[in-house]
């Protein structure tokens, strides 16, 4: 089946790229490594499997493509192209050769302070661009941060929530048309009442799932990410399941500076405000988080 699918995809994309192999796992999507036949570079083709190409999943995938098409930032993995032939829907992005943050944390534990702060600032800066465009990532976690030449790259906007007004400003598409094409992200695509995200890094309000989380939910996840990079352990990582969810609502981790003395109190306080239980007590968006962080190192 995989060989047949690769052959179909290769035929669909034509001669511009030559598919080399499939990656081991891509979640609900299929990921393929390919060579650009015109330029000396590798790319990744993200394919919505044909068996998932029904109305809901196809609209979700198209929404992800629209979001990536809006975002242009040196620390966001960019969209290179997209295509749709019959039941094959895909998009193309650069192949990032470095490890993920998850792999680095597993291999090294806490990162060197300069590396951690630079990566955190770069991800915050990327996320600030998304927030300015009305886009909330909703799944900030180590697996979605990749390293290229020592710099952090934010990836995977597959469950992002896009405010219609923000995308309309950037795309120039009339509001009515934009609403028809992506408004499902605020309804049945995210299944009202269901949590979206990764439990270890989700803001408390994401567990409730009643309303789309705003930029402050990303700030919470960003602070979780920074805390883990600087201390080697994510808050509440000792818990699983329902106990983990309860911890997000009821427990507050100690200052990062109390776990690692090289972490400045100022940086620890930026993270601490980002980890506030109530959204209104956090930094208002990733731009405010970035600016506060930058002022302290």
Image: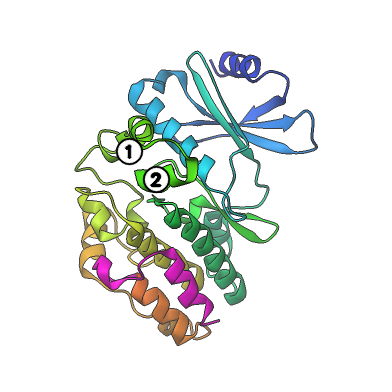
Q: Position of residue 272 (x, y in %)?
A: 36, 76
Q: Is residue 292 magenta?
A: yes
In the picture provided, is 19 more to the left or to the right than 52? Answer: right
Q: Quadrant of the C terminus?
A: bottom right
The image position of residue 239, as x and y in percent, is 29, 60
Mark count? 2
- Report the residue marked by disc 2: 160
Mark 1 crowdedness (10 Å alpha carbons): few <14, some 14-19, many ≥20: many
Q: Is residue 219 visible?
A: yes
Determine the image quadrant of residue 94.
top right
Residue at x 31% of width, y 46% of height: 196
169 lies above or below 132: above
Q: Position of residue 209 (x, y in %)?
A: 22, 48
Q: Is residue 112 above or below residue 203?
A: below
Viewer-closest of 127 and 225: 127
Which colour style is shown? rainbow
Q: Which mark is residue 247?
A: none
- Callout 2: few (<14), some (14-19), or many (20+) C-alpha neighbours within 10 Å? many
Q: Which residue matches tag 1?
A: 185
Secondary structure of the residue carrying tag 2 is loop
Q: Can you say whether 254 is above or below 124 in the image?
A: below
Task: Give, as a single range, the part of the protein colored magenta.
Answer: 275-297
What residue is shown at x 41% (from left), y 18% (from top)? 51
N-terminal of the pair, mark 2 or mark 1, is: 2
Of helix, strand and loop, which one carries label 1? helix
Gap in angstroms between the C-alphas marked 2 and 1:
8 Å
Whether residue 106 is in magenta: the answer is: no
Q: Are marks 2 and 1 in contact (CB under 8 Å)?
A: yes
Q: Is residue 53 left or right of residue 281?
A: right
Q: Residue at x 46, y 80 (%)?
A: 267
Q: Between 194 and 103, which is closer to the camera in this rendering? A: 194
In this view, the residue in front, 71 or 228, is 71
């Amino acid at each position: 089946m995989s060989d047949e699918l690769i052959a179909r995809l290769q035929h669909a994309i034509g001669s511009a790229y030559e598919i080399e192999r499939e990656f081991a796992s891509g979640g609900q999507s299929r990921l393929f490594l390919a060579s650009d036949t015109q330029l000396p570079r590798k790319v990744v083709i993200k394919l919505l499997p044909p068996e998932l190409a029904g109305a809901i999943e196809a609209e979700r995938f198209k929404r992800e493509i629209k979001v990536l098409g809006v975002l242009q930032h040196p620390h966001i993995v960019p969209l290179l192209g997209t295509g749709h032939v019959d039941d094959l829907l895909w998009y193309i992005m650069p192949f990032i050769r470095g490890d993920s943050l998850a792999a680095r944390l597993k291999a090294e534990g806490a990162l060197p302070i300069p590396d951690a702060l630079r990566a955190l600032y770069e991800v915050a800066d990327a996320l600030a661009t998304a927030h300015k465009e009305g886009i909330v990532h909703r799944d900030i976690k180590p697996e979605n941060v990749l390293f290229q030449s020592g710099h952090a790259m934010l990836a995977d906007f597959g469950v992002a929530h896009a405010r219609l007004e923000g995308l309309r400003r950037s795309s120039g598409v009339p509001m009515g048309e934009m609403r028809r094409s992506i408004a499902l992200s605020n309804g049945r695509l995210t299944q009202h009442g269901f949590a979206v995200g990764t439990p270890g890094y989700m803001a408390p309000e994401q567990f409730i799932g009643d309303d789309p989380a705003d930029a402050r939910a990303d700030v919470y996840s960003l602070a979780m990410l920074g805390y883990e990079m600087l201390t080697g352990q994510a808050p509440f990582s000792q818990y699983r399941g329902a106990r983990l969810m309860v911890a997000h609502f009821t427990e507050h981790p100690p200052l990062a500076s109390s776990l690692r003395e090289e972490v400045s109190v100022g940086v620890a306080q930026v993270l601490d405000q980002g980890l506030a239980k109530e959204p209104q007590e956090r930094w208002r968006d990733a731009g405010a988080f970035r600016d506060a962080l930058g002022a302290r190192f």
